[in-house]
């Protein structure tokens, strides 16, 4: 209730001040700048009220309670949650100081407003700014924590897929080492270091490139063991029709011999070893079940946070666009430049949490060992990757960098124009 009261007071006071500023003949504020300022003010009020309601719903939601952890990604060894709070607090302080300058005696007299009314308008703005800072930072902390939880979950899934790939590689080598199977040494083809390039070097590529980890005699050819196929039958085990008749005749006289023969005909060790290796491989159902669990949590996160994040993106774009328009007819100041840069940093910090989880979801597909049985599975995962969306739009680093570059070009153009005029 207190948040709503401050929001209403701030809306009325700010709109009233901007209208008088536009109507005054002693200021250079145009109708376009005033309209955009009112739109930004009401958008800020709407986001603050929505963040108040959303923070309560997220805290009481069991799905988010299970995903919220005391962790977040780090930026230059600094926690992103702490960095989010510091940037938000700095933006609020700079904006409040800028507003205090605008509400000084000379500014109020230019638009025909008494000092008492300007002080009330400034107090309402600071009061609502404090509440909006608290609620939005709380939602931002939850977003960063939950996105980090999803990222860690996807990376654990990737490790399972990498272990599965190693199991497939071992199973493939075992199958190709059997008699009668054409053997292709993939290690020598992919690495170019010879047929006996060691497994440790192959699977730890990028982590340990010490060549001494491999056998010094790796370039020397050595015989490849080719165990006998489990289905092969030795000459002593081949049964002819005459032998079958003899066995039937001697069945009653040689029960012990038959028992010994049954023991000899048990499953060979190679068959048991092959079965154990197959049991270690992940099936398509195993992969799909893990995919569904992670996808469900990411879809839930998107459903709850997409409106808040989309509102933040729109507000920051309008905020920065307003400054670009304002600087076309006014000179840029240090406070204005700081207020222009800090929201872009907030946009980069918050949206990069979504982008990081989405990037890991795309990497998961490339970490899966491709087999003939998984072709349709890979096609499905390419069409429906693990990602968090904002109204069906997947945030990526490319999109974020594109927005930042667009405003950077606009800001650089303003600087160049000022230099040319001088």
Image: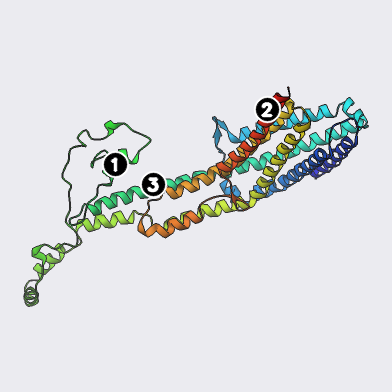
Label 2 element class = helix
Q: Disc 2 marks which residue? A: 416
Residue nearer the viewer, 195 or 4: 195
Q: Disc 3 marks which residue? A: 162
Residue 148: in sight, yes or no? no
Percent x, y of residue 52: 73, 45
Coloration mode: rainbow
Label 3 element class = helix
- Gap in Å between the C-alphas at discs 3 and 2? 51 Å
Q: Split into 4 quadrants, where in the image is the C terminus?
A: top right
Residue located farthest toward the top when viewing the structure as drawn: 422
Percent x, y of residue 259: 13, 67
Callout 3: few (<14), some (14-19), or many (20+) C-alpha neighbours within 10 Å? some
Percent x, y of residue 308: 68, 47
Q: Split into 4 quadrants, where in the image is the N terminus?
A: top right
Q: Residue at x 93, y 30 (%)?
A: 114
Callout 2: few (<14), some (14-19), or many (20+) C-alpha neighbours within 10 Å? few
Look at the numbered discs 2 and 1 and tell me whether their residues touch, using CB distance below 8 Å: no
Mark 1 or mark 3: whose residue is earlier in sequence: 3
């Amino acid at each position: 209730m207190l948040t709503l009261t401050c929001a209403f007071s701030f809306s009325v006071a700010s709109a009233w001040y901007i209208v008088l500023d536009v109507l005054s003949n002693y200021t250079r504020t145009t109708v376009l700048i005033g309209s955009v300022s009112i739109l930004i003010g009401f958008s800020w009020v709407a986001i603050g009220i929505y963040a108040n309601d959303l923070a309560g719903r997220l805290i009481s939601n069991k799905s988010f309670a299970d995903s919220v952890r005391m962790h977040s990604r780090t930026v230059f060894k600094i926690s992103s949650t702490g960095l989010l709070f510091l940037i938000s607090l700095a933006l609020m302080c700079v904006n409040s100081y800028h507003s205090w300058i605008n509400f000084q005696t000379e500014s109020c007299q230019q638009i025909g407003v008494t000092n008492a009314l300007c002080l009330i308008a400034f107090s309402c703005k600071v009061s609502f700014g404090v509440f909006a800072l608290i609620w939005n930072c709380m939602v931002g902390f939850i977003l960063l924590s939950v996105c980090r939880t999803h990222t860690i979950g996807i990376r654990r899934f990737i490790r399972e897929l990498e272990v599965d790939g190693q199991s497939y590689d071992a199973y493939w080598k075992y199958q190709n080492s059997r008699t009668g199977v054409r053997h292709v040494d993939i290690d020598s083809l992919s690495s170019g270091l010879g047929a006996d390039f060691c497994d440790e070097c192959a699977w730890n590529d990028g982590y340990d490139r010490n060549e001494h980890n491999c056998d010094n005699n790796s370039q020397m050819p050595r015989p490849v063991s080719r165990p006998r196929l489990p289905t092969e039958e030795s000459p002593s085990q081949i049964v002819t029709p005459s032998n079958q008749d003899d066995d039937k005749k001697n069945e009653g006289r040689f029960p012990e011999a038959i028992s010994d023969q049954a023991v000899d005909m048990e499953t060979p060790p190679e068959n048991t070893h092959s079965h154990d290796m197959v049991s270690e491989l992940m099936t398509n159902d195993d992969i799909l079940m893990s995919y569904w669990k992670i996808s469900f949590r990411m879809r839930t996160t998107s459903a709850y946070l997409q409106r808040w994040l989309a509102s933040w993106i729109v507000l920051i774009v309008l905020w920065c666009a307003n400054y670009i328009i304002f600087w076309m007819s006014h000179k840029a100041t240090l406070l204005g430049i700081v207020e222009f840069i800090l929201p872009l940093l907030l946009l980069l910090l918050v949206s990069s949490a979504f982008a990081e989880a989405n990037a890991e979801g795309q990497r998961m597909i490339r970490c899966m060992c491709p087999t003939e049985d998984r072709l349709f599975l890979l096609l499905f995962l390419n069409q429906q990757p693990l990602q968090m969306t904002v109204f069906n739009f997947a945030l990526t680093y490319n999109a974020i960098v594109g927005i930042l570059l667009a405003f950077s070009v606009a800001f650089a153009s303003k600087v160049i124009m000022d230099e040319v005029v001088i």
